[in-house]
Image (tube, rainbow, N blue to C red):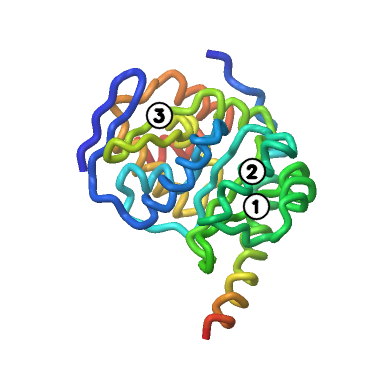
Amino acid sequence: MNLPEIDLDELRRRKERNFQERLKFIDFYVEWLKGQR
Amino acid sequence: MRISFDREKMVIERDTTSLDRFVQDFAALLQVHGVLYVIVSGYVSILFGRSRSSEDVDIIIEHLDRGRFLTLWNALHPRFECIITENADTAWGEYLLKGTAVRFSENGKAIPNVELSFPADPLDRWTLEHRKEVFLNRIPLHISPPELQIPFKLFLGSEKDIEDARHLYRTLKTSLDAELLRQFNRKLKVEGLFNKYLR
């Protein structure tokens, strides 16, 4: 089975971008929760 | 929970949770519309019985052109809504094509949600190509191969990720392709974490 090329530096950058996206989602979710009250 | 394996598929029998039903319903729409998909990250461990919930379920789908994406968007929308944007063209052109995921939840809910993305790199494309079929209470789902999922969780490296990796490894140990697992451990440079936490 051929394994894919893995660029670990790029993977670390993706991990950080994903983390930033999750932080933005938390902000969205908190505002959504406030709107449910 | 009962799990059985053969070379082609895995079968899980356990109580179905509301999160499982959410994932099964979303995946069924992808399947019906002929969209190749693979579930990655936390839900894979949950599927195999890990005792935690999740706010989001990561799904990689094949790259769709605008027409196919609009068809999928319209098929999803009676039940699911995109919580990032109400505009399909924005979701496709400003998010997915630029490598950012879009989130879909059931109408009127924010969680749980599916974090949907196009393949971003060769690793995503490999995962999609080599996805495994799992039947949860006879309903099919496509997941990332555990031999990649376990090292990838170790690479992510939070306590939760390491626990997910350990759960998967301990649950599926006898069915894993040990050589493939070893190669991904090496490529992701997580042999040390593997030996420390999973052995």
- At label 2, counting other C-alpha atoms closer than 10 Å, the crowd grade (few under 14, some 14-19, many 20 or more) is many
Q: Residue at x 55, y 24 (%)?
A: B129
Q: Pick out the residue farthest to the bottom.
A: A37
| Image quadrant where one finds the C terminus of chain B | top left
Q: Residue at x 49, y 35 (%)?
A: B31
**Which SS class for mark 3?**
strand
Question: In terms of depth relative to the viewer, which is nearer, B166 or B96?
Answer: B96
The location of residue B20, given as percent across then percent down, is 37, 50
**Which SS class for mark 1?**
strand
- At label 1, counting other C-alpha atoms closer than 10 Å, the crowd grade (few under 14, some 14-19, many 20 or more) is many
Q: Do labels 2 and 3 share a chain?
A: yes
Residue under label 2, please give it. B117
Query: What numbered label is drawn on residue B133?
Result: 3
Chain holding disc 3: B
Q: Residue at x 67, y 60 (%)?
A: B84
Chain holding disc 1: B
CA separation in Å, label 3 and label 1: 24 Å
Residue type at the position of mark 1: Val
CA separation in Å, label 2 and label 3: 20 Å
**Relative side of B99 to B26, left or right:** right
Chain holding disc 2: B
The location of residue B17, given as percent across then percent down, is 31, 55
The location of residue B153, given as percent across then percent down, is 49, 42
Residue type at the position of mark 3: Glu
Query: What numbered label is drawn on residue B102?
Result: 1
Q: Which of marks 2 and 3 is nearer the N terminus?
A: 2
Residue type at the position of mark 2: Ser
Q: Earlier in the sequence, mark 3 or mark 1?
A: 1
